[in-house]
Amino acid sequence: MRGREVVVIGGGIIGCSAATLLAEGGARVTLVESTALANGASGRNSGSIQHPFDPVLGALHIRSLTLYRDLEQTDAFGLPAEPAGILLLTRDLDDAAQRAADLQDEFSDLGAVALDPQAVSQLEPTIAPGWAAVLVHSGYPTRPDGATRAWVARAARAGVDIRVGAGARPVMEAGRIGGIDMTDGTHLATDAVLLAAGPWVPDLLPSDGWRPAITRTWGVTVQVRPAAVPSHILEEGTVHTINVAGGMAVAGSDVPSIFSLMPAASLATIGSTFVATEPDPALVAPLLLERAAAFVPGIASAELIGFRVCGRPQSADGYPFIGPVPGVEGLTICAGHGPWGISTGPASAELAVASMVSGTSVPNQLRAEREVRPA
């Protein structure tokens, strides 16, 4: 790959880290982003780099932590030396005990332990009485766009040509890449393209050829400033629905939602939703806050800072697609991380780059061309 021209389409965590690694390996790299860097899920996530509780994704997460440590640690992005810890909340102590045992069996390094409601209250006084939990040794709070911005800075230092403001589509000729056409009329000649445009990747491939099983799921998160911010990352393991009155553009009025809270200095980010059609965050945000107050009462009186919505690239089996696109020489894909982009993205990008540079095989569960079964 040294000296070769490579185009990376997509300015999120995957595209920026892949472009950096390619350039540092000697390639001449152009990174193309249609709107803004870190504009999608890579910049509008809840801000937690954490273990996905899956052996395949967990391996990507552990490697990603090492790659993050190699980034310049600044005020804009700095990975804490130790995780904040995640409290998986439940009303059922027996359920907490079983889940802690299951996690300990599969991921002993996470040190999962069950806590009764009294222990939870002592450890995290901001939580309402009556909640049991599983405490997990994971979860690094970050600024939502901080990780991607840190890779952008390193990419620039590596000489990546970063172009923002025009979309791009690969040009395929006789079963191989012939370059890219940009929406501003520019044509770039290249014989290698990496598609890292998240949920929009399927739109960049021919409808009559291979297409990855990636769909968009939309998430809304809300940022508040409570009087007291929890010191741990908080999550509930059960997906509920919230009923939205009014003209929100989703199918039906019940919106799948899961409570999570991410602490960041004096702020807390509350999430999140999982819907197939882009929702109106102004309608969803009050309902997310109402649910959150059942876990952390102080949320009810917290100052509202803002809310955001983003589309996630969700694969059918929960695993990203990484590696050569079947039937098109010179075209590689790295997309489909769902909610785990910043937690696993740099390691995924490293796998994609290795497949491009040296033809290194991607693990079977992550191969672009694989049999996909729903999770």
Image (cartoon, rainbow, N blue to C red):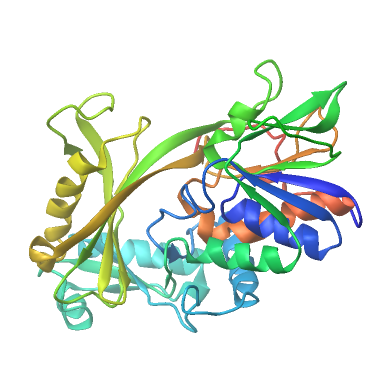
Tell me what residue is drawn at x 62 percent, y 67 percent: 153
Q: Position of residue 127 (x, y in %)?
A: 16, 71
Across the whole image, how many numbered discs are drawn on residues? 0
Q: Residue 330: give x, y in percent of width and height.
A: 84, 37
Name the residue rendered at 15%, 52% in the picture.
291
Give left or right: position of 352 versus 262: right
Q: Position of residue 375 (x, y in %)?
A: 49, 39
User: Quadrant of the rendered structure where residue 46 is?
Assistant: bottom left
For residue 163, side relative to residue 77 (left or right): right
Residue at the extreme right of the image, as rendered:
3
**Residue with the most extreme top position:** 208
Confirm whether residue 360 shows in the render. no
Residue 117 image position (x, y, % from top left): 16, 72
Camera sees residue 312:
yes
245 or 38: nearer the viewer: 38
Compared to 152, does 40 lie above or below? above
- Pick whichever, 53 or 94, lies toward us: 53
Q: Classify 146 as above or below 173.
A: below
- At horizontal 26% and vertical 70% (from top left) the residue drawn is 267
In the image, residue 95 sits, relative to residue 84, either above or below, namely above
Residue 318 versus residue 187: which sits nearer the camera? 187
Residue at horizontal 79 percent and vertical 65 percent from the top: 24
